[in-house]
Image: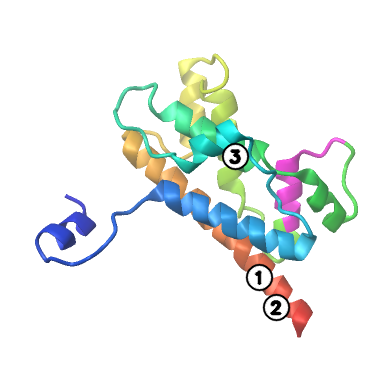
């Protein structure tokens, strides 16, 4: 029994259950709003109606079926990696390679704001899992295990894996929001 259920059922306290999916949605919204204030446009593209509906109703896997975790991780990758809009980042950075990928642009943006180079590593690991973990492409069991290890979800249940990834993605987005807010505060002083 998780702590929040114990507190509700036995202690009679009003408390919400942890909702990692909601935390990711809130953190993405906060980061997009902060980036709009700094860059004039959000870092993430608006989602099409179908993906937005999936994202807004995203919950973790409901079973330990091997196929249950992949779709939610694919959705997170679509929304948080594929959904990066490179143009505001390019405008901010000023210089960039002709074929520099949006995830690298985001990493450079975070570094310019004073963040560490590994602040966005969860997004890179998520992208790697999508590409090499058998979620979006056929792959070998060995490749899937390497991708799971890079995402730090090896030997976890589906629920634990989702919670771990969602928590680290939320932390990444909160770091981005904090760095942007710090830069905005500096510019108003």
Q: Earlier in the sequence, mark 2 or mark 3?
A: 3
The residue tagged 2 is 185
- Which image quarter: residue 100? top right
Type of secondary structure dominating the magenta stretch: helix
In 3D space, how far apart are the residues under numbered discs 1 and 2 (Cα atoms)? 6 Å
Task: Name the spot of residue 53 as percent of width and height, x first.
Answer: 51, 37
* Disc sitting over residue 181 in the figure: 1
Assess whether residue 167 is covered by the magenta stretch: no
Q: Quadrant of the C terminus?
A: bottom right
* Disc sitting over residue 79 in the figure: 3
Q: Residue at (33%, 54%) from the top-left corner?
A: 18
Assess whether residue 108 is covered by the magenta stretch: yes
Total residue callouts:
3
What span is colored magenta in the figure? 99-109
Q: Earlier in the sequence, mark 3 or mark 1?
A: 3
Q: Residue at (67%, 43%) from the top-left corner?
A: 46
Task: Name the spot of residue 12 as percent of width and height, x first.
Answer: 13, 65
Label 3 secondary element: helix
């Amino acid at each position: 029994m998780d702590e929040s259920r114990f507190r509700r059922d036995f202690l009679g306290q009003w408390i919400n259950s942890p909702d990692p999916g909601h935390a990711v949605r809130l953190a993405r919204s906060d980061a997009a709003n902060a980036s709009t204030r700094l860059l004039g446009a959000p870092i993430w593209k608006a989602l099409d109606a179908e993906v937005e509906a999936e994202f807004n109703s995203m919950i973790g896997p409901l079973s330990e079926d091997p196929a249950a975790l992949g779709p939610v991780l694919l959705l997170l990758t679509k929304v948080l990696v594929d959904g990066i809009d490179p143009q505001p980042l390019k405008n901010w950075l000023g210089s960039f390679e002709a074929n520099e990928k949006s995830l690298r642009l985001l990493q450079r943006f975070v570094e310019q704001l004073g963040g560490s180079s590994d602040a966005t590593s969860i997004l890179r690991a998520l992208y790697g899992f999508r590409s090499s973990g058998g979620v979006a492409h056929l792959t070998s069991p060995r490749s899937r295990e390497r991708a799971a290890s890079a995402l730090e979800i090896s030997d976890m249940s589906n629920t634990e894996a989702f919670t771990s990834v969602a928590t680290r993605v939320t932390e990444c987005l909160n770091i981005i929001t904090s760095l942007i807010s710090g830069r905005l505060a500096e510019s108003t002083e």
